[in-house]
Image (cartoon, grey):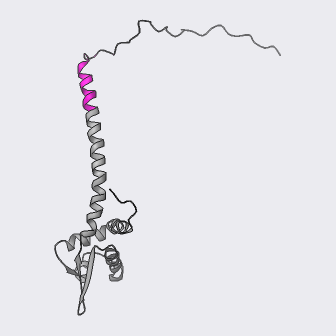
């Protein structure tokens, strides 16, 4: 069952909502990096970049370790697993909906191919519809003043 009220899942989706943070995670997917190495490709101040790292760390997506004066970051992808489960639930829903639409369209195509081409659908009634009147009636009485 999909959990709709999970604060940790909210943090993961919030962290993934930003392109800079997704880029950092992609870079860390190749292995751990220093903060300086990560920040080099982004045109922002180091304190601004550190805020992005704090969001990722709060969501549990990265871990920071300090070796002397060098801070290294490492990817922890486990929290994304629950997000993937949540998304997979809706993927199944939309797959079922699109399959139903495909079946409906296929059925409509089959019905259309059974009718002779260029012939309007036949009426089930033998009664003809009266045609509309051609002209309006005579003018009505006028009021004298």
Does the magenta-highlighted stretch encompass residue 119?
yes
Name the quadrant containing residue 18. Answer: bottom left
Q: Residue furthest front?
A: 1
Q: Residue at x 19, y 78 (%)?
A: 32
Q: Is residue 53 above or below residue 104?
A: below
Q: Nearer the viewer, residue 137 or 9?
A: 9
143 relative position to 43: left or right: right
Which percent across, then down, holds residue 4? 38, 59
**Residue located 31% across and 58% down the image:** 86
Q: Residue at x 28, y 41 (%)?
A: 98
Image quarter of residue 71: bottom left
Q: Tell me the quarter of the image containing the C terminus.
A: top right
Which percent across, then down, holds residue 139?
68, 10
Residue 131, above or below 77: above
Quarter holding residue 122: top left
37 to the left or right of 58? left
**Residue 137 or residue 11, whichever sits in front:** 11
Of the 4 image quadrants, the one containing the N terminus is bottom left
Task: Give the image location of residue 77, x and y in percent.
Answer: 24, 70
Spot occupied by residue 30 in the image (x, y as percentages of width and height) = 16, 73
- In magenta stretch: residue 7: no
At x 23% / y 93%, what residue is drawn? 68
Going by the picture, which residue comes out furthest to the bottom?
68
Q: Residue 93 vs residue 142: left or right? A: left
Counting the numbered discs, the total is: 0
**Magenta segment range?**
105-121
Q: Residue furthest left?
A: 30
């Amino acid at each position: 069952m999909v959990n709709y009220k999970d604060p940790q899942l909210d943090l993961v989706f919030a962290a993934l909502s930003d392109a800079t943070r997704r880029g950092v995670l992609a870079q860390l997917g190749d292995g751990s990096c220093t903060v300086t190495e990560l920040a080099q490709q982004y045109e922002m101040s180091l304190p601004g970049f550190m805020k992005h790292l704090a969001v990722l760390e709060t969501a549990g997506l990265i871990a920071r370790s300090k070796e002397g004066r060098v801070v290294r970051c490492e990817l922890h992808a486990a929290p994304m697993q629950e997000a993937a489960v949540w998304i997979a639930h809706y993927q199944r829903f939309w797959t079922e909906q699109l399959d139903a639409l495909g079946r409906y369209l296929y059925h409509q195509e089959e019905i259309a191919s059974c009718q002779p081409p260029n012939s309007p659908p036949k009426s089930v009634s033998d009664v003809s519809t009266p045609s509309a009147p051609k002209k309006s009636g005579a003018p009505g009485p006028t009021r004298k003043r």
